[in-house]
């Protein structure tokens, strides 16, 4: 075994508040409209990736969440090719490593990646994953390009991955060039700009096999009679309004726009042939809960947004409202009796205290939400949510120290 | 008690295959787009209404399904006013009745109406009801106007009622006049033109309180960013295509258009603030079942369409396909063990024989649908459908003989 050189990075996931749905170029992953997202705290939702290079490696290989996966897909190949093309000279005197930029074409890499959240939960794991792959490969290969260029490369792995190259609020500019060179993300504001926001994700139980977003958006582009109108007329206006709302930390406008755009994205899915249903009855009940609360208070209390699955991402303006939201969620969607509280609410769980819930028994004494009209006929839905993740807006990708490496330097393979 | 003169009529309900959603005038009930419907067989889904007049009546009164209801609503008043305005002379020598057309303004009516299907099932009972009210009032009052004029009056009771004045396939022309005079229905073809069609309605179990279509479409007009585009650009084209499909009895085009337009109507509901969910998980599963079947066969097998509720209206091109459809429905959505077969499938139940189901035990030996891919992992949903109604396209309103009267001539009140 010759030397093994590694780099390890961690990248966040993100959730769109103005949605990306529809490609104008399938191969280059160029979208039909701009989108805006908020990056989520990598402590709770992120991918960690180690990329290793060694003259001993005879081919590129990758392990995801402990299982080796094929790198033959065009999306992985695009990212590897684009980064290799831009690789620089790398020297590590201690290890006696001298790699000229022309050498990278002949060297192979081992990639090991983990998500700190269940992939199956449908929480944009590919966004975090491809952002992390591109970011970490670029570090290993001493690519001098800025984040904008890396964002554009990550886009070719998974569209929404381009937005995970930055923290805070991020806009993916669709661009105009046919080769996609101007299609990538820019940061609108960093994660400290609107730091009061609290995010609660409801991971909804579902047995339904979902349509992949790749094939779903292809079908929508081909068959939805409404998609083009949305992309050309409605989204450009909403993008401007959303940028303004974020700049002014105007939560009312932010929430109205985010909810309307999430619903419109799902409307486009429904307008597709065959129709795509990502939200289920539980998703609808969460929306109805939020809407009734809003109507009672006369102003938006929290925003909701749903990606290509039934999970709700709920955004509260501050911890106080987030605690009220969590009370409501636990009131209407309690755990089943056999579920432990600590596995039902994960992430930044300190918000539980503010919600007055310290132990499972406290769930029985949650206050009746003020907006409930018929106190004698309250419908609850135990077991319809798998668990909640409490988190907040977060930062972009970071490089981790060697102690976080997922590759055993003695073997070049993942640690067992 | 002086003389009581009665007329009794029966009117069908109808289901839109190009949807009406959105009014341009709330008071006159003028729609934002044309719509096309198929009238359903009144034997299975209709309203029967007796209108009685007597000098003994001191005010207008109405009983619906056995309960007296208020006639003070603007919609009843519009229909009564418009018909009274057009009333003619009526003579019944046997009863010694002489009513001059000018007398109708001073005479009061008693209206008794029944639906032969559950109102709560959300099956356009108001369409049948208002069509029947207007049709029967017009008969009693010897109104000489043609069906087109009556259709325009029924429209002011409930928009879709204007389409229930005819059998077969019916188009509601939105009209251009501000006073609504040119907004009413015309018959495209009568019920004998495409008589092979079979309709199966799945009445879906639901505890959810639904948004009324009146308030729902008001919200959509005010808030949906997509509705205007649908009404102005998409529907006019679909109306032309649907007329062509009906004229040619082209079931493939008919089904594709009907399904797409049902889905787009629900997409507009979802694009409304707050979003409106009429379909639930069971509705989605019925659609997925139909779409998988279509994909397996490579062509549309049956059409589905959903109104403002979770119930599915499924249209098969002929009895053979309808039998296959019923097999599939009973396979995936069996009754609960305590449900009797004869209360689970009602209406034109002879189709059951062709589906090979003569007794409840036959439900266990229904064939596995050919399109099922994973035979070891079939998901069934017992109890998620209340019952099925088997029916077909049907005729328009008819006058019934006196023996069908719902009013006791001795009292002027409903028979007990």
Image: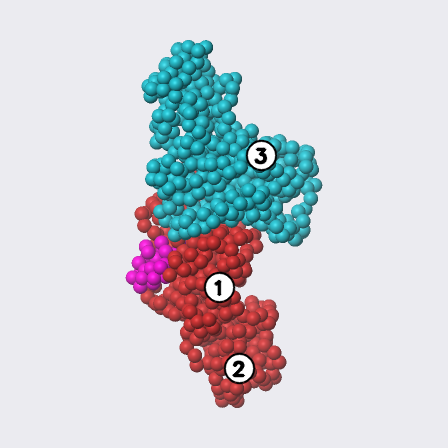
Chain colours: A cyan, B red
- Residue under the point 34% across and 45% down: B296
Magenta residue check for B63: no
Which residue lies at the image location 53% right of the left edge and 77% below the top edge?
A: B81
Q: Nearer the viewer, residue A164 or A250?
A: A250
Quadrant where the C terminus of chain B sits is bottom right
The numbered dot on residue A192 is: 3
Mark positioned earlier in the residue sequence (1 or 2): 2
Q: Which chain does the numbered disc 1 sit on?
A: B
The x, y position of residue B174, in whole percent, is: 42, 67
Labels 1, 2: one chain: yes
Q: Characterize the local packing of mark 3: few (<14), some (14-19) or many (20 or more) Cα atoms within 10 angstroms.
A: few
Query: Mark 1 = which residue?
Result: B23
B329 relative to B246, above or below: above
Residue A374 - label: none
SS state under label 3: loop
Q: Chain of mark 3?
A: A
Residue B155 position, x and y percent, is 47, 69
* Distance between mark 2 and mark 3 Cα atoms: 80 Å
Q: Label 2 lies in what chain?
A: B
Q: Which residue is mark 2?
A: B5
Q: In the rendering, at what x and y percent does residue B130 appear?
A: 50, 70
């Amino acid at each position: 075994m010759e030397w093994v050189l590694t780099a390890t990075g961690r990248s966040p996931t993100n959730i769109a508040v103005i949605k990306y749905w529809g490609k104008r170029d399938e191969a280059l992953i160029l979208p039909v409209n701009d989108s805006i997202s908020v990056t989520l705290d990598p402590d709770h939702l992120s991918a960690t990736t180690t990329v290793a290079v060694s003259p001993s490696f005879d081919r590129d290989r990758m392990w995801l969440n402990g299982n080796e996966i094929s790198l033959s897909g065009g999306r992985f190949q695009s990212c590897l090719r684009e980064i290799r093309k831009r690789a620089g000279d790398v020297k590590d005197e201690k290890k006696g490593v001298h790699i000229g930029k022309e050498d990278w074409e002949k060297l192979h890499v081992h990639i090991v990646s983990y998500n700190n959240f269940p992939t199956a939960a449908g929480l944009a794991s590919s966004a975090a994953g491809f952002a992390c792959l591109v970011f970490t490969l670029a570090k290993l290969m001493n690519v001098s390009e800025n984040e904008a260029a890396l964002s554009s490369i990550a886009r070719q792995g998974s569209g929404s991955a381009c937005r995970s190259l930055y923290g805070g609020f991020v806009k993916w500019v669709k661009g105009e060039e046919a080769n996609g060179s101007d299609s990538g993300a820019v940061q609108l504001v960093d994660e400290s700009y609107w730091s009061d926001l609290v995010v609660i994700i409801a991971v909804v139980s579902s047995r339904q096999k979902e349509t992949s977003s790749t094939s779903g958006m292809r079908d929508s582009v081909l068959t939805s009679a409404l998609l083009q109108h949305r992309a050309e007329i409605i989204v450009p206006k909403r993008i401007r309004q959303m940028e303004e709302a974020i700049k002014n930390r105007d939560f009312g406008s932010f929430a109205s726009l985010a909810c309307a755009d999430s619903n419109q994205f799902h409307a486009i899915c429904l307008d597709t042939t065959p129709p795509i249903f990502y939200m289920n009855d539980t998703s609808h009940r969460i929306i109805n809960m939020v809407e009734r609360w809003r109507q009672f208070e006369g102003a938006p209390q929290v925003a909701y947004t749903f990606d290509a699955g039934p999970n709700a991402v709920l955004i509260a303006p501050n911890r106080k409202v987030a605690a009220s939201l969590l009370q409501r969620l636990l009131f209407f969607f309690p755990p089943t009796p056999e579920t432990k509280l600590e596995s039902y609410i994960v992430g930044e769980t300190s918000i539980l205290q503010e919600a007055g819930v310290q132990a499972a028994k406290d769930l029985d004494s949650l206050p009746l939400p003020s907006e409930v009209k018929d106190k004698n006929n309250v419908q609850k839905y135990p077991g319809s949510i798998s668990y909640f993740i409490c988190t907040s807006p977060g930062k972009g990708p970071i490089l981790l120290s060697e102690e976080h490496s997922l590759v055993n330097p003695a073997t070049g393979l993942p640690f067992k």
